[in-house]
């Protein structure tokens, strides 16, 4: 089911997104539908892989406001800016990034730990220097991906005094953890009655990590991460709104001509419709 198939040149009215279910199958995440055939499938993507980007004509950009396409299929920000302006291009790029980040979070339930990595002031790395901090982080992340099977979604925050730190959602099994203890009493530290940990092999500064559980908690962590992706300044990490790495599972897409083909009795949590132009409308049904 997950093997790639040749690209279908047929246009469809409906695009359904599926994510892994707890029982090992798939569950419906969303259904998007146009009043006319506009979706061109890129084939069933293998989990952990993305289809090659497909360029869109400028005449298709009027559909972009509804974000009907997979984020990988959209044109780059420079082209969008030519049509819509820099501010609108930035807003839409941020929204695309949030959708992509949420896809990773939903599709990888083993991302069960939320950690904050900070930097101490030293001769080796200037915590005010983003490039220097990013270089240290990238080396550390790549090493853990290769050696420990780390999977992660990370965003950057600049603190009030200008220092850099990173918020990371990752799989705790890939980390070398020790219980965090008070430097004054030596007692184990907790946050909301949950035990706090330190990451032993992060030597550039300080760490704090805690396990997360339950969909509500994951949603709160996602919103916390998204807050930093929305800031006007310092919103990109190395040219990106967020970092991700490891063998990440990605959504599965299916296409059809009527939304009812995909409705399976799952409760719809949110529905919205956008009137585009010339009688064309786009509707999204969200199930997660």
Image: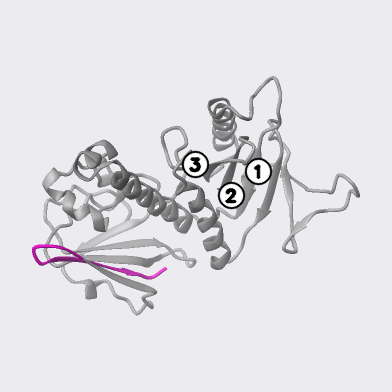
| Residue on which disc 3 sits | 246
Q: Earlier in the sequence, mark 3 or mark 1?
A: 1
The alpha-carbon separation of the residues under discs 1 and 2 comes to: 8 Å
Reading the chain from its start, which is encountered first: label 2 or label 3?
Answer: 2
The residue singled out by tag 1 in the image is 175
Q: Report the residue at 52% width, 51% height from top.
A: 225
**282 falls in the magenta region:** yes
- Please name whichever residue, 2 or 135, is drawn nearer the observer in this view of the structure: 135
Which of these two is toward me, 102 or 77?
77
The span shown in magenta is: 275-288
Q: Position of residue 33 (x, y in %)?
A: 21, 66
Residue 171 numbered tag? 2
What residue do we see at 44% from left, 38% from top?
236
Residues at discs 1 and 2 in contact (Cβ within 8 Å): yes
Secondary element at image label 2 = loop
**Frontmost residue, 103 versus 150:** 103
From mark 3 to mark 1, how far is it between C-alphas? Answer: 13 Å
How packed mark 3 is, by other alpha carbons closer than 10 Å (few <14, some 14-19, many 20 or more), is some
Q: Is residue 201 left or right of residue 56?
A: right
Give how far across and how far down residue 287 sits, in percent. Answer: 38, 70
**Dot 2 alpha-carbon crowd within 10 angstroms: few under 14, some 14 to 19, many 20 or more:** many
Can residue 174 be found in the magenta stretch? no
Residue 284 placement: quadrant: bottom left
Magenta: main secondary structure equals strand
Q: Secondary structure at mark 1?
A: loop
Left or right side of 71 for 193: right
Q: Residues within 10 Å of mark 1 (few under 14, many from 20)?
A: some
Residue drawn 39% across and 74% down?
269
**In the rendered image, which quarter contains the N terminus?**
bottom left
SS label for mark 3: loop
User: Is any atom of residue 283 visible in this view?
Assistant: yes
**Residue 94: image location, x then y, percent:** 38, 48
């Amino acid at each position: 089911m997950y093997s790639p198939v040749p690209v279908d040149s047929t246009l469809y009215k409906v695009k359904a997104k599926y994510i892994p279910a707890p029982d090992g199958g798939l569950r419906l995440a969303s259904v998007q539908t146009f009043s006319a055939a506009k979706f061109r499938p890129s084939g069933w993507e293998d989990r952990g892989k993305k289809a090659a980007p497909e360029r869109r004509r400028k005449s298709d950009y009027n559909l972009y406001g509804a974000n009907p396409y997979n984020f990988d299929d959209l044109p780059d920000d420079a082209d969008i800016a030519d049509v819509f302006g820099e501010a609108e291009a930035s807003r839409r790029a941020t929204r695309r990034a949030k959708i992509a980040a949420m896809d990773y979070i939903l599709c990888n339930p083993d991302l069960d730990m939320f950690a904050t990595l900070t930097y101490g002031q030293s001769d080796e790395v200037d915590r005010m220097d983003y490039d220097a901090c990013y270089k240290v982080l990238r080396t550390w992340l790549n090493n853990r991906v290769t050696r420990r099977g780390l999977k992660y979604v990370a965003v950057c925050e600049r603190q009030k005094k200008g220092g850099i730190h990173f918020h990371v959602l990752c799989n705790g099994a890939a980390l070398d953890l020790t219980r965090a203890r008070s430097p004054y009493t030596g007692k184990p530290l907790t946050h909301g009655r949950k035990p706090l940990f330190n990451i032993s092999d992060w030597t550039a500064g300080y760490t704090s990590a805690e396990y997360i559980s339950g969909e509500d908690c994951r949603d709160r962590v996602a919103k916390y991460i998204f807050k930093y992706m929305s800031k006007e300044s310092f919103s990109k990490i190395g040219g990106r709104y967020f970092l991700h790495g490891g063998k990440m599972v990605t959504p599965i897409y299916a296409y059809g001509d009527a939304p009812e083909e995909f409705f399976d009795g799952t409760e719809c949590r949110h529905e919205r419709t956008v009137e585009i132009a010339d009688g064309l409308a786009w509707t999204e049904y969200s199930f997660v």
